[in-house]
Amino acid sequence: MASGKEIRTQIGSIKNTQKITSAMEMVAASKMRKAQDRMAATRPYSDKIYNVIQHLAFAHPEYKHPYLQDREETKRVGYIIISSDRGLCGGLNNNLFKSVLKDIRAKSDKGMEVDVCTIGQKASSFFKRLPVNLVSQTAQLGDAPRAHDLVGTVKVMLDAYNEGRIDSLYLVYNEFVNTMTQEDKILRLLPAKPEKPSEELSHHWDYIYEPDAKEVLDNLLVRYIESLVYQGVVENIACEQASRMIAMKNATDNAGDLIDDLQLVYNKARQAAITQEISEIVAGAAAV
Amino acid sequence: MAMTIHVDIVSAEQEIFSGLAAAVFASAAEGEVGIYPRHTPMLTKLKPGEVRVLKDNGEEEQFYVSSGMLEVQPHVVTVLADTALRAADVDEAAALQAKQEAERALSDKTDKRDFAEAQRELVEAMAQLRAIERARKGKGR
């Protein structure tokens, strides 16, 4: 059995760890709240732009944009994968990567090739060592990313789509359901498919486009894709903080359990030492 | 009550204005536009400039928009503002940078490795060592 002093040091070190994890838990909780606010703040834009896109589906533009049309065959697909920059957030990133890999494998079994673009440190170090084609990456966006930080990454993929190097584009991120639940999500960005228009608005009409339909639609659809990616990033940050909060809470609880167990062992060892000492004294006295 | 039109001004990061107005003025790509209720549907690009919202109580609010899109429906006006001035060459430069980042990450295998990766390699190496040790013990006996 370990001696009293050893156990005491061990308890001390676990207590220190517990302090760190509980501090991280609190930090994550407050960051999560801010991230959730930010998530809510981005929603109006994406709702509005989605409405406009849907209106476009109702309208009958003389110009059909390539982003809205399926290609005949898909030879190569692109993925934009969003992860956190830091670890210690439970299985969040790994679960996401696992489901992407499954998807990628299914695609490559069908003979499609895969291009990957990563946002976040964890994704880039994970996909770097896999035999996939990593075409662009962004990392260290911080807790409050700006929408224009993502322009470059998105443009690489859109250019690839425009030039026919990829035939469809997917966005991979964690969806914030609630504090306890985050779900990995694979969303098809391109070709974009707005939902079927409802009947009331489907009579013939069209916008006036200024300067012209092509230019306006180009602009609008690029913004649409960017807003989806931006929202994915913001949502992923909320997920990261929520997941870290839960992970750190578990770690704190586990440390508490460990300390309780060790305390029992320590008490037992101490009691045994005392008993031994007494019996030694008694035996010594009897010998005299 | 005078006729009003619902106006939403949003950027990717936040909602800037939402409410009823008597009219909206903006500098569109083809020139200044003034939008009153029951305007015909229109979709246009915005030039850097002001968006003025004339509220039904006669007050006027002004917003600066660096660029963006303006959508007009008979009773709804939506301004989708960009958060920063967007120009083709700036976008191009950003795209180039993202590409270079990836190339750098792929080629940069020797000097500056990030901590997480080093840690991962350490764990892998330790697992290998343990496996070797186990194999060696198995042989010894």
Image (cartoon, rainbow, N blue to C red):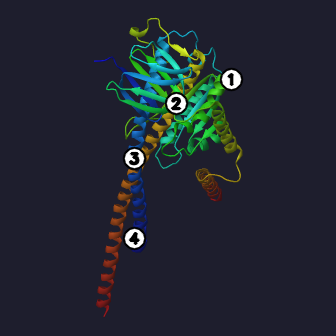
Disc nearer the start of the sequence (4/3) = 4
State the SS at label 1.
loop
Quadrant assignment for the N terminus of chain A: bottom left
Neighbour tally class for label 1: few under 14, some 14-19, many 20 plus, Cα within 10 Å: few
Identify which amino acid the numbered label 3 is placed on: Ile
On what subunit does the disc labeled 3 rest?
A
Identified at 65% across, 23% down, the residue is A162
Q: Which residue is mark 4?
A: A8
Alpha-carbon distance for marks 1 and 3? 44 Å
x, y percent for residue A258: 38, 59
Corner quadrant of residue A128: top right
Residue A108, picture quadrant: top right
Circles 4, 1 touching at the beta carbon (< 8 Å): no
Label 2, secondary structure: give it.
strand
Label 2 in the same subunit as label 3: no
Distance (Cα) linking label 2 and label 3:
46 Å
Q: Is residue A131 visible?
A: no
* Residue sitting nearer the eye, B94 or A87: B94
Q: Which residue is mark 2?
A: B49
